[in-house]
Image (cartoon, grey):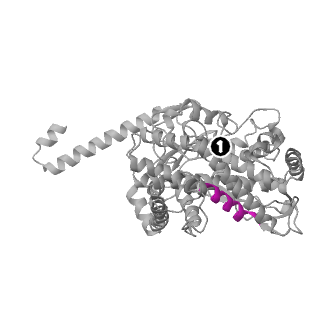
Amino acid sequence: LVTRVLNSTSFSRRMAVTLILLLALISAVSVLLLTRKSLKLPPGPAPVPVLGNLHQLGPLPHRTLRDLARLHGPVMQLWLGKAPAVVLSSPEAAWEMLRVHDLDCCTRPVSPGPKRLTYDLKNVAFAPYGAYWREIRKLLVVELVSARRVKAVWCAREQQVEKLISTLGCAGAKPVALDEHILSLSDGIIGTVAFGNIYGSDKFTQNKNFQHALDEATDVLSGSSAEDFLPKAVGRFIDHITGVVAQRERIFKHLDAFFDMVIEQHLDPNRAKSENSGDDLVDVLISHWKEHRGTLKFTRNHVKAIIFDTFIAGIDTSSITIMWAMSELIRSPRVLNKVQTEIRAVVDGKDRVRPEDMSKLKYLRMVVKETLRLHPPAPLLVPRETMRHIQISGYDIPAKTRIYVNAWAIGRDQASWPEHPEEFNPERFEENEIDFKGEHLQLLPFGTGRRICPGMSMGIATVEFTLANMLCCFQWALPEGMVVEDVSMEEEGKLNFHRKTPLVLVPIILCKRRNH
């Protein structure tokens, strides 16, 4: 047929080529359809044209997807516009993907929002799997767990917790909106780790709108633009006319200017530094850039991308978890009394909890585990993408499929948590060794495998130490006229989900603070 067409005098050469391409396209589509028909794909709700299943997700997708999984099963296929996706809602299915097939699906889907804000995927969280990601993650992990850095982080943690306790003590037993104070604490710790002890002082030129820009950036990282789900040209056009691209550029320029300012300050040989503070994280990154260490071709943009990563991952996770823990505790007087009794027994007359006390606070660790079970900061984790064809629970998952692990649904799975899984009950961890470090399939707030959160240990230490001191130094009460049933547990977010309304509590000081 091809020869006939090419030799035909009734067709121009252009028409002949067009026909050949059309036949090739039809053939390719036919092969694709036949191939897909031969696959055993996961069940799922029927998609609609263009949108797929996007219209079914709603503002709280982890809850909607849990409900859909009850109808279609724990391995469920969706279409997010043009993008195929699979949602895993049981511990067994998640474990099979995250452990058995970890290497086959440890890359990330490329999205225009994260790509722009991370300087073309030069950070750790969104970088595609490969040699670059392995080396940059190793650099970050080694730096975070080095003895010098761990000591510096603990110093920052103690300073910021002391500041928080002093601020709350000045409230005079009046209602306080905790959210802003906890966010300030997390920001202070991460800022000190990244920029040194001058962060937040008058020696540091700080952008007042930096935290707001980070909040906006978190929404962009959720990958919810039209270009993520529609054909690129159409999606890009929609994002332009709806202002998504303009907003993304505004956020990027805001953050970029701040990061440039930070780098310039660190490059200044006469910059102000705290005595005996040593090199901070930015100093280390600049050394890799200027001295060409390792095999990476480190650039200024790599430094910026990792600074961005550190703040996005560090601030939100810790502050969200602390706020959910306090929300659950104030609604459960029995648990609140029990954990405070443990803490005060361990402190034994001291004015505060110290780092060396933390290993003795067993019940506090259970409280944190239970909080993470019910309120994982990123309920669907950060999506992965299959690099090759795999099978999960007997279903075929083709390459280039997005994988979402519903950690929120897994934490409330009736089979894994048979005793009232929707209730806050830390005692469920008394008779087992289940932990959140990625080794137990029932509790995966930070994921597991190669893509497990590299800052998990640092974040958990901040959560536990902050809670320990807040519970040691204050008795907590609701504002006058409120009862526990009035405490809203509504949530909102896009990638990370936090409380929808501020948590207002009354801190009643219990111990006198010494001047440190």
Please provide percent x and percent y for residue 53: 55, 51
Please provide percent x and percent y for residue 353: 80, 50
Q: Nearer the viewer, residue 514 or 324?
A: 514
The amino acid pointed to by label 1 is Ser
Q: Nearer the viewer, residue 228 or 479?
A: 479
Give above or below for 387 relative to 335. Answer: above
Q: Residue at x 74, y 49 (%)?
A: 465
Give above or below for 484 relative to 4. Answer: below
Residue indicated by mark 1? 457
Please provide percent x and percent y for residue 501: 72, 65
Prevalent SS, magenta region: helix
Residue 367 visible within the image: yes
Give above or below for 462 relative to 387. Answer: below
Alpha-carbon neighbours of circle 1 within 10 Å: few (<14), some, or many (≥20)? few
Taking the magenta stretch, the answer to whether it contains residue 483 is: no
Work out which quarter of the rendered image holds the N terminus and state it.
top left
Q: Residue at x 11, y 41 (%)?
A: 7
Q: Nearer the viewer, residue 478 or 508?
A: 508
Work out which quarter of the rendered image holds the C terminus and state it.
bottom right
Question: Is 389 left, or right, of 178 in this rendering?
Answer: left
Count the numbered circles shown: 1
Residue 453 visible within the image: no
Q: Give the range drawn in magenta.
A: 177-190
Taking the magenta stretch, the answer to whether it contains residue 187 is: yes
Please provide percent x and percent y for residue 2: 18, 38
Say what secondary structure mark 1 lies in: helix
Q: Nearer the viewer, residue 504 or 89?
A: 504
